[in-house]
Image (cartoon, rainbow, N blue to C red):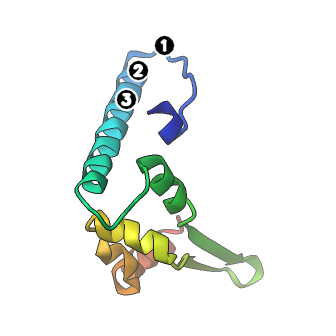
Amino acid sequence: MKDIVKLRPVHLTIKERVKAHVTICVLSYLLIVSIDNKFKNNDNIDMSVGEALEELSDCMVDTIEIEKQNMITRNITKPTSSQKKILEVLEQNKLIKKSYYKKYLKKMEDNKM
């Protein structure tokens, strides 16, 4: 699991931070197992969870800021055919549609995130 989510040793001493770290690790594990089960039950995809996460890691929000005009524009990179296939197998087709994520980009702009 550490290799897939690229974890490295963390030295925590505060109780709340330790709990938070363990929670994140458990959630990561559950996500990996869920993705793996979806892939095993689908003949349309032939890649590991690690390969899929690596492929999806190229998806990101691009931010362009023009300081003199006080303007910020955001866009999400267009998914490749391989990324679309992964999202379809994971039943997340809505993430492929610009109309779905456009409202979140607007919220980001409104909140100056």
Q: Picture quarter containing residue 69?
A: bottom right
Q: Identify the residue at horizontal 37%, vertical 83% (top origin).
A: 97
Residue sitting farthest toward the top: 13
- For mark 1, does the 10 Å Cα neighbourhood hold few (<14), some (14 to 19), or many (20 or more) residues? few
The residue that disc 2 covers is: 18
Residue 112, horizontal then vertical, whole percent: 53, 68
Q: Which mark is residue 20?
A: 3
Q: Identify the residue at horizontal 55%, vertical 79% (top origin).
A: 75
- For mark 2, does the 10 Å Cα neighbourhood hold few (<14), some (14 to 19), or many (20 or more) residues? some
Give me the C-alpha separation between circle 3 and circle 1.
Answer: 12 Å
User: Is residue 25 visible to the viewer in this orientation of the structure?
Assistant: yes
Chain-order first, disc 1 or disc 2: 1
Is 102 above or below relative to 10?
A: below
- For mark 3, does the 10 Å Cα neighbourhood hold few (<14), some (14 to 19), or many (20 or more) residues? few
The residue that disc 1 covers is: 13
Give the residue type at disc 2: Val
Give me the C-alpha separation between circle 2 and circle 3.
Answer: 5 Å
User: Is residue 110 visible to the viewer in this orientation of the structure?
Assistant: no
Left/right of residue 59 with respect to residue 70 in the rendered view? left
Is 72 above or below relative to 112?
A: below
Residue 111, horizontal then vertical, whole percent: 47, 68
Residue 54, horizontal then vertical, whole percent: 54, 54
Give me the C-alpha separation between circle 1 and circle 2.
Answer: 7 Å
Left/right of residue 77 with respect to residue 66 in the rendered view? left
Q: Identify the residue at horizontal 36%, vertical 68% (top origin).
A: 87
Q: Are marks 1 and 2 in contact (CB under 8 Å)?
A: yes
Say what secondary structure mark 2 lies in.
helix
